[in-house]
Image: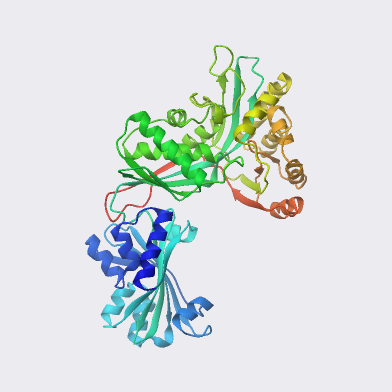
Amino acid sequence: MTAGPLRERIREIEKETGYLSPLQTILLLTDGSVTTLLEAISGDEVSVTTLSQVVATPGKDVASALEIGTTEMVNHRTVVLKNSRTGEALVYAVSYTPLLRLEPGFKDDLMRADTPIGKILKKHAIESRREILKIGVRESDNIISLGLGNRSGPFLFRSYKIIRAREPLMFIEEFFPASSFTGEQRVVIESPSRLHLGLIDLNGTLGRVDGGIGIALDHPRTVIEACRTGSLTVLGGDDESNARAKRAAEAVISRFGLRGGAQIVIHTTPPGHVGLGSGTALSLTVARAICELHGLSAKAGELAKIVGRGGTSGIGTAAFEYGGFILDGGHAFGAHGEKKDFRPSSTSAGLNPAPVIARHPFPDDWQIHIIVPSLDRLVSGNLEEEFFRESCPVPIGEVRETCHEVVMRMIPGIVEKDIELFGTAVNRIQELGFKRLEIARQPPLIPALIAGLKEAGVPCAGMSSFGPVVFAITDAGCLDLESETKDILGDVPCRILRTKANNHGASVHRTKSSPFIDPLSS
């Protein structure tokens, strides 16, 4: 790539990740040794930790870049460049080197796998140049993340050739976290999504309404990155997510009288309006980020009230703060209560989130299967408010039975790790009260999927919130739920994810105001 296209590509990357610092741009575009550059900036020696090294044949793309045949042997080496003094992982690199193009001494040094390539080239006085082929941003990758000390994505990357005497000597790919080498204070916040198993009381006879049951999920997550700037900008999400994030940030800035703004980059967020609580998670994640940037301490409940979330169910707020299995106690109801009618959280702004009355770690070895069918019929906004008006109050007998199931089967099942007892309660609650009405509002495919999963042998299955997300919880991974799901859904596309509970809530990662940062830590 020539200078013009590279500069244009930098601008495209910034639309996804936010502003790239000069150091980040240099690391992506340099035609010199990355090792030498890192040592010059840090003042410390850079060492190599080899993760793998094998002699093998290249793939088609690598062979093409190296201008060799696909049967020619190459040295395939995966390493991490580290700061020798601090041990900090800096860059994850993968190289491919045709063995026939190496002198014996050069080959010996390369195969020892303990020296950066830049230093090997210098030692053997190899005159060469680097030709950049591609630069870009790559979303979270477990293998790269692990190699870089469990750093979260996204990752900036580049691929290039080292050319000697007009012949490719090596093909190299390098990756580093987009939160590294920024030279400024940033925060990265990851928050869980959640399953909403049901609202307990939409009758109100006892003077309280709502009451939620839910589980925080390890995946999918909401991940944002933020830094202080003069104005407020939001990048990375779709139009709806960006607008929601901006509203949340503006609300926090106004509430605390903060000066300046922030650049917020949305890296990942679950799909909206499907039953995973993405709206609450994003709003709270942004609110926490603004507070962190300004050194403010605020509880999740206070932030939820500021951004207008949690007015019906407290599950999303509690999942953000605590994780695990959550039971909330709803809101005071009636002429002198917080709520005077039945309505969803989206139209209950300004209320305190419901208090958590029970919270327990959800068993780590229970697997949670999430199915997100692609359906046009989604309940949200005005449709959700109308549904509350039409459906409430629900029969008091069903409210009482729901409470009985929660107290005598669901919670004991979690505490004693008895998935059959827990599952029996979940299955029955799907047939009671407001949850029964929510499922009845869905296309026939949703109740058919829930029934089919239970027939396939899962201990429990149900629909989260207003759906259409369907979940199944098992204590083993041997069930072929993907095949069963696709058989039931037929031509309807869907996304299937296997995850587990998040038992700690949102995590905050801070970067130092330095080109080199500590590994992300909660």
Judge whether 35 appears above or below 66 on screen: above
Q: Who's the residue at 29% across and 36% down the image?
A: 259
Judge whether 366 appears above or below 121 on screen: above
Q: Is residue 52 visible?
A: yes
Q: Who's the residue at 26% across and 80% down the image?
A: 123
Quadrant that contains the N terminus? bottom left
The picture quadrant where one finds residue 328 is: top right
Judge whether 333 appears above or below 190 on screen: above
Counting the numbered discs, the total is: 0
Would residue 118 be found to the left or right of residue 367 on screen? left
Would residue 352 be found to the left or right of residue 180 on screen? right
Judge whether 289 appears above or below 1 on screen: above
The picture quadrant where one finds residue 409 is: top right
Would residue 391 be found to the left or right of residue 67 on screen? right
Q: Who's the residue at 43% across and 31% down the image?
A: 303
Quadrant that contains the C terminus? top left
Q: Is residue 59 visible?
A: no
Residue 333 coordinates in the image, percent (x, y): 58, 16
Residue 204 coordinates in the image, percent (x, y): 64, 17
Which of these two is toward me, 411 or 396?
A: 396
Residue 223 coordinates in the image, percent (x, y): 46, 47
The picture quadrant where one finds residue 134 is: bottom left
Residue furthest toward the top? 336
Would residue 355 be found to the left or right of residue 43 on screen? right
Residue 340 coordinates in the image, percent (x, y): 58, 17
What colour scheme has been applied to the protein in the rendered image? Answer: rainbow
